[in-house]
Amino acid sequence: MKIKILIVLGIFCLLVLGAGGCIGGQAKPQGFSGVMSYDEILYLGSMDGKIMAINPSARDQELNFPSLSNGEWSFAFTMPSKGMACGSSSVSIVIYGTPVMANGLVCIGIYNGKVLMINPSARSQNLSFPQGRSGEWSYPRTDDAIEPIVGSPVVANDTIYVCSSDSRVYALDMTYGDEKWRSVPLDGKLWTTPLVDGDTIYVSTFDGHIYALSINDGSLLPWVFEAKVGFVSPLGMYKGTMFVGSFDRNLYAVKVGDDKPLWGFTGGNWFWATPVVSEDIVYAGCLDGKLYAISSETGEELWRFDAGSGIVSSPVMANDLLVVTCESGNVYLVNVQTGEGRRIKNPDDPQSADRPSIDASIRGHLCVLDGIVYIGAQDNRLYAVDIDRGKIDWKFPLAVE
Amino acid sequence: MVNLWNLIILNPMLNGLVALSSLLPEAVEFGLAIIILTVVVRLILMPLTLRQLNSTKALQSMQPKIQELQKKYGRDKRKLQQEMAKIYKGAGVNPAGCVWPMLIQFPIWIALYQSIMRALATAPENLLDLSRHLYSWQIVNQAIPLNSYFLGLNLGQQSSSAGIGGLILAILVGGTMWVQQKMTTAPSADPKQQSQSGMMLLMMPLMFGMFALMFPSGLALYWLASNVIGVVTQYFIGGGWGYLVSSSHT
């Protein structure tokens, strides 16, 4: 009888644990890294925790990956596991930010709380990490980590600037990875990318502040912008005005030095992505599925384009077109003058009007290179979209060994 | 089906939780909101809880008669069931009466669980997901993102990673569950049954103590609040500490 009770309790245990995963708990962080290009090579993080260098030409020719002669490599960085996790003693990393280039090296911040400086040459030789002589480092150096990093690092003055969920901004020496300074804790988690403008770093916070920090020592400068509601998007800047999305579903324009916003524009949900500004027009993607074109001077709406589902990635400009992607996986080419757009068809089902361009959500930063837009989607594949021809050229699975 | 669930149950509860948070002091907003919402939900479900308690009590009071019947008709299962049905009918008790109120409450618990987990939004994906569930009310928008800290505990973090605070919380979850169960578990004259119920009395609190360690502290806080309310309800409805005190005297 005791065995029966134990079996029943065991099943109950499994049901509760299973239910925890099935009945709508929190999704495990998967990451949505953006794509960056440098010297004809694409750099991005995969959803299985790798940092990868991909040559579009080699992918177009469907060469075996990695094609070392074409500058390709893949680097799986792992972290020691914590807590009650069982099994392996290390876990894959999660990447949300977009890599940046720093003196020919790739720098990226990871959700597991580290900043990595990676030498492409050392990675293509698959040497152990970090190769100090090749300029590689990780911050913090030991197995320790700071709080999760969601935004991207920024490079300026031989320094890497990065925000962390411990509500601090870090300045790291680009060559050795030494900490130059760390700011005092600001407000809440900083899931943002800092904005560097001259000698000042601007940071928007979840608690509704825009702080200005000295680039030299991270000290707080006198000007602070304070809003009633927190800011959800990183800052975009154009002609001394910053544009930022707020949790109150507004996009605000804030002039540096002012204590009131220049204007506010209300959308149907949060403006998650950093807006793009060109020729006095702000192009802002909203989680309500619309792309809004707004006058940067007045906040007046010029046109709107309905993408059908939430826009998480910032749109990118390519000639007179804006490439807009959304959660449903659709990719649109939108005319910047008229706001009219056309949808890229799914290459596996070009006749279907319903099937999205890509069979997965799109959340990461897009990259334009030589008339092609590169998109890292949530199916852990990289897609190349030819803008002129309006079609997907190729897709490449990132979960390759 | 999922949309209907979100529309009718999850979204109102989630937005209620977030709106409640924005009315509370920021330092304890979310933790206190979980406790208050748990109390509110328990109050709404009180008629069902009372029905369940009364049915359980009635069934327990009939245990001596049932045991007699078991001895008498132990080998004839059909006859035993017939006689038991007669007794239940005579006393106006439905054995399923203590089960269905629990079943009705189950979706509410799931919604509360989902609300807590979604509102915490510990990763960017979770925050994106949260945006789909929130109303455009100002009171809701003002509260986002919620302060997940409560009395030094990060409610979005696994209790096992939260140090001594998480451990204390897990012990409290297990302890209060044990007290609640002990108050309602009648001692049996049959040593075999006594051993079984004794094991159940220990296993359930142990299991939930373990779950409290494995799930985020916010959920453990909800279990703790729920258990404490259960104990208080039992105390006032059942007339004191019940079998917790009487069994300790024997």
Image (tube, rainbow, N blue to C red):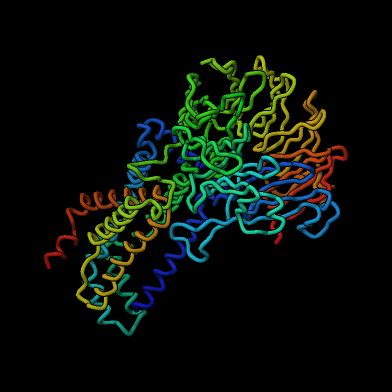
Find residue A11 and report its image quarter.
Answer: bottom left
Residue farthest right in this picture: A389
Residue A251, given in percent of the width and then of the height, sits at 60, 25
Relative depth, front residue between A280 and B193: A280
At x 58%, y 32%, the residue is A194
Residue at position x 46%, y 43% in the image: B120
B17 relative to A69 in the view: left or right? left
Of residue B24 and residue B158, the one placed in the foreground of this image is: B158
Outermost residue, left side: B249
Q: Residue at x 80, y 53 (%)?
A: A70
Of residue A250 and residue A275, the one placed in the foreground of this image is A275
Above or below, A292 relative to A49: above
Residue drawn at x 61%, y 31% is A271
x and y, in percent, of residue B212 in the image: 38, 56
Q: Is A113 left or right of A348, judged from the image as shown? A: left
Q: Residue furthest front?
A: A133
The answer to whether one can see residue A210 in this image is no
Q: Quadrant of the C terminus of chain B?
A: bottom left
Please tell me whether residue B122 is drawn above or below residue B181 in the rendered image: above
Q: Is residue A161 above or below residue A393?
A: above
Q: Position of residue A312 (x, y in %)?
A: 64, 38
Q: How many marks?
A: 0
Can residue A393 be seen at all in this image of the molecule? yes
Q: Return the residue found at the far bottom.
A: B75
Give the image location of residue B34, x and y in percent: 37, 42
